[in-house]
Amino acid sequence: MDVTFDGEVKLIEAGYYEITADSVQIEEGAAEKPVIYLYPTEETDVSVKLDFNGELVCTYPRYYNGWNVTAFPDGTLINHADNKEYSYLFWEGTSDTEYEMSKGSVVKGEDTASFLQEKLALLGLTPKEYNEFIVYWLPKMQNNKYNLITFQGEAYTDNAILEISPQPDSLLRIFMVYKSLDEFIEIEEQTLNSFDRQGFTVVEWGGTCVE
């Protein structure tokens, strides 16, 4: 994967660098691995469509121009296409998305789990949700010396638009982008906002690694 970094890195003292980042451009397809949870207030038939500016390479359950499910308040889903039970909707794709990485956090690999627990809870994930996130991503991150971690906004959501019917009352979309670093760098801390769940709530988490 080719990556173009726009910004400046300068040596402050031995082993420490200051970074001024504008963006990281992923030149070739970056894998994005989101899952989608549906929490209606009562048993509800739900249609979910994804308008993705890229190529879908894997979906579970299989995506037939959308997912049509019966969703229950505890998050259980019954997929209409195969009448089987699922915990969430999964998709993976590749795209040439430019991610904003001028603000974030540089975290030691060994501290990644505690960092993600704290930040994902702040962003609004439940323990069940952030545990599933961490179990997926931690093996890929914990052995790095440092990780530059950012949570994306419109750079992600504008390229992966969800069309959900009936429309949810609350929608939380968390997408992490991280890069392995050999040295600690200074970067402006990202401001993260909390999330209030009201009514029919849809939660999505995903991420990608910039190599």
Image (spheres, grey):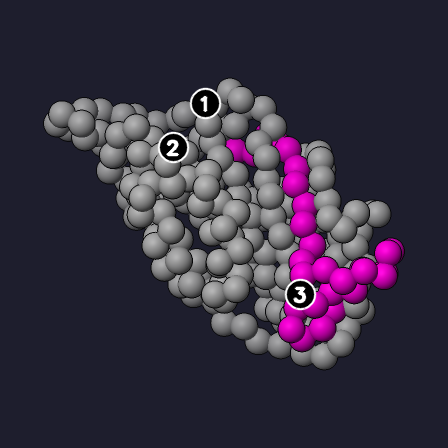
Q: Which mark is residue 180?
A: 2
- Give the residue at the far top of this rendering: 2
Q: Is residue 12 above or below residue 47?
A: above
Tell me which residue sits at (52%, 39%) in the image.
208
Q: Are marks 2 and 1 in contact (CB under 8 Å)?
A: no
Q: CA distance from mark 3 to mark 1?
A: 36 Å
Mark nearest the camera among 2 and 1 is 2
Q: Is residue 27 magenta?
A: no
Which is more toward the observer, 183 or 87? 87
Lateral position of residue 207 relative to residue 53, left or right = left
Q: Quick check: 142 above or below 36?
A: above
- Badge 3 marks a residue whose secondary structure is strand
Q: Residues in magenta? A: 71-98
Q: Earlier in the sequence, mark 3 or mark 1?
A: 1
Q: On residue 4, which mark appears?
A: 1
Q: Which residue is mark 3?
A: 38
16 w.r.t. 66: above or below: above
